[in-house]
Image: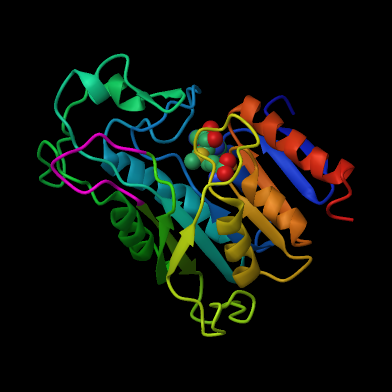
Amino acid sequence: MSNSPEVYTVHDVRIFIGDCRQVLPLLPAESVQCCVTSPPYWGLRDYEHPDQLGDEETPEQYVQDLVSVFRQVGRVLRQDGTLWLNVGDAYARNGGVGVCGPNAKVGNTKKLIQKRNCKVPPCWGLKDRDLMGLPWRVAFALQADGWILRSHITWIKKAPMPESVRNRPSRATEEVFLFAKNPKYYYNNQAVRERSGANLKNYWVLGPEPSEGEHPAAFPTELARRCILLGSRPGDAVLDPFSGSGTTGIAAAELRRQAILIELNSDYGRQSLKRIQKGVQQGLWV
Ligand SMILES: C[S@@+](CC[C@H](N)C(=O)[O-])C[C@H]1O[C@@H](n2cnc3c(N)ncnc32)[C@H](O)[C@@H]1O
């Protein structure tokens, strides 16, 4: 099959290099217990691939694209499965200089928004400088598509990316949504507790971790670890359709779960392969 994606298997982790919209339909239905993922944020980083999500002309199209991806994820999830979704927000801007200019960067990547010439998108009544509320728009669209929205967790960043703004507070949080396919779903409330022993609260203060690679937007392993502990049992399969540097795979291997990772950019795919091989060589998950 000439269109088959490249696949690597290390330990209990399978890494597919390809577009998740093509790979997800190849996975068996109801074979995964939980999905932990963070798709590209709209208009933010350029992952330098023609099939990347996040570079849609409008944020409306972005929301629709994510709904289609997660419809496939829903097919692959077991009936009692859950989806843990981290999505970031964006501002509508008109302009052509600074953070909107042709040379605009975000960390070590190009900024995607330059491709659209930095125009306020013609939807939702957006105006220059409006915060789009994208995480909640995605959440409501998924809810309308059949998902049950069970929680929103605020990830409070101990060391957020600095912003040179003077007319609003700097951003230091992101959303992680917990969705279920059905009203009865697997959730191990004993697996992660507050220090006091109380039920876990819906704000997680997480610090940066020493970077193991060049992925510009990796989430903390502790974030993936918590979602996996709460949403699966040892031996279960965990999916990340936008796996980047493979953080979900690392956390899954560490917690004795199987993992299925999908990543479009082969450099990042190889980066995750190396991270997982390193863990195996160090005997971390024997
Ligand atoms: C926010 S990053 C994920 C980072 C990851 N959580 C980590 O810790 O490294 C989103 C990833 O989605 C990938 N991506 C973009 N479009 C994709 C697509 N259509 N199919 C699969 N992966 C895609 C990008 O290359 C990028 O690495």
Q: Is 108 above or below relative to 121?
A: above
Q: Is 225 above or below relative to 13?
A: below
Q: How many marks?
A: 0
Q: Residue furthest top?
A: 102
Q: Quadrant of the N terminus?
A: top right
Does the image show residue 242?
Answer: no
* Magenta-drawn stretch, dominant element (helix, strand or loop): loop
Picture residue at 63% right of the left edge, 60% below the top: 225
Q: Is residue 236 left or right of residue 79?
A: right
Quarter of the image for residue 244 reads top right
Q: Is 94 above or below relative to 89?
A: above
Q: Position of residue 261 (x, y in %)?
A: 66, 45
Picture residue at 78% right of the left edge, 36% below the top: 8
Q: Quadrant of the C terminus?
A: bottom right
Q: Nearer the viewer, residue 184 or 242?
A: 242
Q: Nearer the viewer, residue 205 or 135?
A: 205
Picture residue at 35% right of the left edge, 41% below the top: 62
Q: Is residue 240 left or right of residue 136?
A: right
Q: Nearer the viewer, residue 283 or 39?
A: 283
Q: Is residue 157 left or right of residue 186?
A: left
Q: Which residues are magenta?
A: 162-172
Q: Is residue 129 magenta?
A: no
Does the image show residue 202?
Answer: yes
